Amino acid sequence: MIDNDVNAGWMDRTAVGGRDVLLLAARILLGAIFVQSGFGKLMALGGFIAGLESQGVPMAAVAGTVGAVVECFGGLAVVLGAWTRLAAILVAGFTVAATLIAHRYWDAAPEAMKMQQTQFMKNLAIIGGYLSLVASGAGRYSVDGMRGPGA
């Protein structure tokens, strides 16, 4: 019979002992896709804005520019662990907006509905990851960690 208290104790000690490495890995894994995607949008901003206009987004030029900047530089801040809580909440907000614009599975054609629902749910998981960073902070291996407590 497995003693759950012993296992929980071992897992807790391992997670707490590896907290800073785990937070570094989480920041890199969560942020990298946003840096890449946001940079791509910034390099082809006109096309991104045109896509938003075609989806009926109001003030698409402003929304597209702000969104691409938040996505790219917010993602970079998360990877570096700089202003992590602020960057994480901004990127989470961007992801909420992007999800509601691009992955409205309930409005999708039947043949695209399942794929859009999967993308919608994936984005919910990403938002959860960013909210975890808001709660935990960046960890020691970060710009925030180098600046000290309360950074």
Image (cartoon, rainbow, N blue to C red):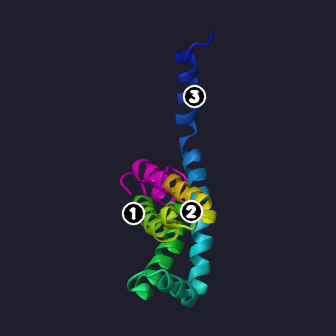
Please give the name of the residue rendered at 54% of the width and 23% of the height, measured from the top-left corner: 8
The span shown in magenta is: 127-151
Report whether 61 appears left or right of 6.
left
Figure quadrant of residue 59: bottom left
Looking at the picture, tell me which residue is in the foreground, 43 or 15: 43
Amino acid type, label 2: Gly
**First in residue order: circle 2 vs circle 1:** 2
Please give the name of the residue rendered at 56% of the width and 62% of the height, measured from the top-left corner: 31
Amino acid type, label 3: Met
**Residue 14's spot in the image, x, y percent?**
58, 32
Q: In the structure shown, which secondary structural element does the residue marked by tag 2 occupy?
A: helix
Looking at the picture, tell me which residue is in the foreground, 105 or 26: 105
**Residue 44's spot in the image, x, y percent?**
60, 87
Q: CA distance from mark 2 to mark 1?
A: 13 Å
Magenta-span inclusion, residue 64 = no
Q: Is residue 121 visible?
A: yes
Residue annotated with mark 1: 86
Residue annotated with mark 3: 11
What residue occupies the far front of the structure in this picture?
Answer: 110
